[in-house]
Amino acid sequence: MWATDLLPYFFEEYGHFKQRLQTALSGETYHIEVQDARKLGYPDSSFDKVYAISVLEHIEGDGDSVAMREIARVLKPGGLSCLTVPAARHYSEESIAEEIYYKKPVDGKPVFYQRHYDEESLRSRLVNPSGLELLSIEYFAER
């Protein structure tokens, strides 16, 4: 089992999850490593399942589409990918130049980027570039 992130800022906190998972997985090794979703270091058809939880919406430019092609590449034929992204009635992008999470602004430059996908952009930016088949869309909301 593999878990990745672009930066290792949460890896130390994930240590207790790693210990519990390795116990629950009966000896299967749980790896945590730095990877860029736009250029994964895994061979083609490496995984039965790929999850991207609150990741793709933060990759600027066409990075979300590039990452989806990489997910499709490392997914075995017949494999399953589960993604979460923010949904909205209309597609939008925003950059935030205030302190957020672990990031602090320098010289007023944006430190945080995110997209909100409508159904058309979800298909055009994520599903279509990947070549994967969309099985279902589920919507969850917060007030």
Image (cartoon, rainbow, N blue to C red):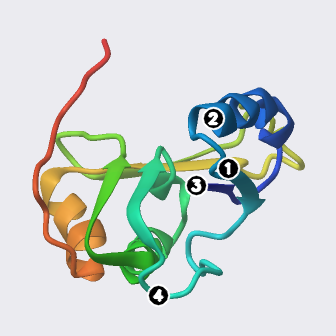
Whole-percent x and y of residue 44?
47, 87
Name which residue type carries label 1: Tyr
**Cα separation between marks 2 and 3:** 9 Å
At mark 2, the secondary structure is helix
Q: Look at the numbered discs 3 and 1 and tell me whether their residues touch, using CB distance below 8 Å.
A: yes
Please say if 31 is above or below 123.
above
Q: Residues within 10 Å of mark 1 (few under 14, many from 20)?
A: some
The residue that mark 1 highlights is: 30
Name which residue type carries label 3: Met
Please say if 36 is above or below 19.
below
Q: Which mark is residue 21?
A: 2
Whole-percent x and y of residue 141?
26, 22
At mark 1, the secondary structure is loop
**Cα separation between marks 2 and 4:** 25 Å
Foreground pick, 77 / 139: 77
Side of 88 where 110 appears, left or right? right
The residue that mark 4 highlights is: 44
Q: Residues within 10 Å of mark 2 (few under 14, many from 20)?
A: some
Residue in the image at 42% along x and 60% along y:
50
Q: Nearer the viewer, mark 4 or mark 3?
A: 3
Tell me which label, 3 or 1, sits earlier in the chain. Answer: 3
Side of 27 where 59 appears, left or right? left
Q: Is residue 74 visible?
A: yes
At mark 4, the secondary structure is loop
**Cα separation between marks 1 and 4:** 20 Å
Q: Which mark is residue 1?
A: 3
